[in-house]
Image (tube, helix red, strand yellow):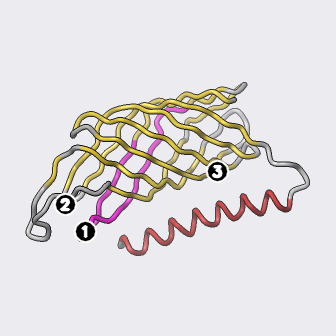
Amino acid sequence: MKTQHVLPRLGLMLGLLLGSLASAEEGSAEPLTHRITAYFHSGLDLFLSDFRTMGGVGGGFGVRDTVNDRFILQADARYLLGLGNAVELRAGAGIQRQGTWTPAALVMVSGMMGGGMRFMTSERSTPVVAPALTVGLQLAPLRFTHSGTQFSLFELGVGVGSEWPGRGVSMHLTLLEAGTTF
């Protein structure tokens, strides 16, 4: 599948998710309940393209708003060591199962910037300096919520972005995520 077909589809999925959240707010007899969670996470992130490779192992923190114990809106930041020092900023929206076992699926937008390995090719004779921007899907199959505490193991994510010319791929593995609700 080509990049120009993937990005509009992911944007459409995000729009449908946010639209269903807005319609749930307007049409429901119950008021919306928000649960704000602060969390930390550790894992591995990589961005690979023909022109650069960046990422590594690291950790960070984030904030998540869970609406009616079902819809998720979150933003996080992480610092990565390995293939240069890099910082990654991410934002996402998704849906989770209600209950104690709360697996989730999210559409994520990511920007990674900082050091890494840069390559010169015949298509590009100057190094890439702009952030590596990607859109992708993240799955959290081993997420649990109990008494205001969230705990997740082995979250997997993949994304695609453009390097103009060419495209890049991002891969994400969260080994551990833990948070507490306010």
Residue at the image point whose x is 77% and y is 63% from the top: 23
Label 3 crowd (10 A; few <14 / some 14-19 / many >=20): some
The mark total stands at 3
Q: What amino acid is at disc 1? A: Gly
Few, some or many C-alpha atoms within 10 Å of disc 2 (few <14, some 14-19, many ≥20)? some
Q: Is residue 66 magenta?
A: no
Q: Are marks 2 and 1 in contact (CB under 8 Å)?
A: yes
Q: Magenta region: which residues?
A: 152-172
Quick one: label 2 or label 1, which is nearer the N terminus?
2
Q: Main secondary structure of the magenta part?
A: strand
Secondary structure found at label 2: loop
Residue behind mark 1: 166
The residue located at (44%, 40%) in the rendering is 77
Q: CA distance from mark 1 to mark 3?
A: 31 Å
Residue at disc 1, secondary structure: loop
**Is 60 left, or right, of 141 in this rendering?**
left
Q: Residues within 10 Å of mark 1 (few under 14, many from 20)?
A: few
Picture coordinates of residue 165, whole percent (x, y)? 24, 71
Q: Disc 2 versus disc 1: distance between alpha carbons?
A: 7 Å
Residue 50, numbered label:
2
Q: Quadrant of the C terminus?
A: top right
Does label 1 or label 3 sit earlier along the sequence? Answer: 3
Classify residue 88 as left or right of residue 155. Answer: left
Q: Position of residue 152 (x, y in %)?
A: 54, 32
Identify which amino acid the numbered label 2 is placed on: Asp
- Mark 1 vs mark 3, foreground winner is 1
